[in-house]
Amino acid sequence: MTRPPLHALQGFVIAARAGNLSRAAEALHLTVSALSHQIRGLEERIGQRLFVRVARGVELTADGQCLFDRVSPHFDAIEQALQPYRARRDDVLTITLMPSFASSWLVPRLPRFLAAHPQIEINLQSTANKVDFERQTDIDAGLRYGPGTWPGLCAVHLFDDWVAPTVSPELLQRLGHPTLETLGDFPLLGAPGGRWSDWFEHFGGTAPKRFVANFDDSETLHRAAVEGLGIALGRLTLTRPMVEAGRLVTLFEERLQAEFSHYLVFPERSERHRGLQAFRDWLLQEAQDYAASAECVLARAKGKEPRKAAIPKPAARKSSAA
């Protein structure tokens, strides 16, 4: 038997996935006539009809579905194997990051990077999902809040974060200003345990037996505080824009070091990416300026150096993805 017609099999797989010969031909940079000719040749070779025409395109026959199930995984494997060898452009940079960090920290600063490096096209993928750099080879690097240890990835420390009670001005006006000792008598957002326990243990007062509400992500927690639902133990990096806009108030100068820190992470294959090198240098300077300004803002507000909690940062937990 002669060698299998791989080009026809590829056209068959793409047409099966598209369910439409026109779209499949466009993806292959062929005419519809040329693709149809390939598929007819494949049908003649195996002696089975692979497609039937329907109102909006084509559908697989039972024999076509059987062939698709057998050959499509092999084309996927070939595609995956070739990913690391595809040409990379140093002037295109794709970064993954959390939506909350994108809106509160990176995006307001990004115009400065683009002004300094107008030749670089930057693509931001805002997602809370874990990223597998081995499979998602179109992503060059990520900005992550975590322990700083991601197996197989390079991690560059940017800055630490801090948590402090924050509240909406409206709720503060309605209920009055708590003291460290009376904070537990006010409506708190969170759950027993966690950092609230560290807060009360270190700064005094008594934790409530019941919290108003608990949230599984920081963005929703901070939004609930803005809406006046209660007092949140907010991360200062994420709440600072809301504080500066007057939508939240930080209650005390006291603060705790957050559980994790902010990092730039990237796989080894991205180390020689010139666009990433430029972004990393710029990012480190922005992180340094931000950390310094955060100290100055708090010091000016209180007329003295801010007091930091003396308790150690919680032990880092290992993670297998970024």
Image (cartoon, rainbow, N blue to C red):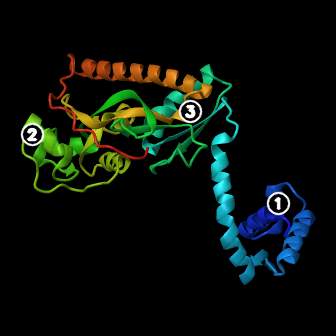
- The answer for how far apart the CA atoms under marks 1 and 2 are is 68 Å
Can you give x and y, in whole percent of width and height, for residue 248 in the image?
31, 38
**Camera-side mark, 1 or 2:** 1
Q: Is residue 19 visible?
A: yes
For mark 2, what is the residue? 201
> Outermost residue toward the front?
1
Placement of the N terminus among the 4 image quadrants: bottom right
Closest to the observer: 177 or 173?
177
Can you give x and y, in whole percent of width and height, for residue 321 in the image?
42, 46
**Camera-side mark, 1 or 3:** 1
Closest to the observer: 99 or 157?
157
Q: Earlier in the sequence, mark 2 or mark 3?
A: 2
Q: Residues within 10 Å of mark 2 (few under 14, many from 20)?
A: few
Contact (CB < 8 A) between labels 1 and 2? no
Determine which of the numbered discs, if any, sits on residue 25 in the image: none
* Residue name at image x 56 percent, y 34 percent: 269
Q: Earlier in the sequence, mark 1 or mark 3?
A: 1
- The answer for how far apart the CA atoms under marks 1 and 3 are is 32 Å
* Residue 70 as seen in the image, left or right of residue 180: right
* Residue 159 as seen in the image, left or right of residue 314: right
For mark 1, what is the residue? 7
For mark 3, what is the residue? 270
Q: Which amino acid lies under the numbered mark 1 shown in the image of this protein?
A: His
* Residue name at image x 34 percent, y 46 percent: 218
Can you give x and y, in whole percent of width and height, for residue 151 in the image?
41, 40
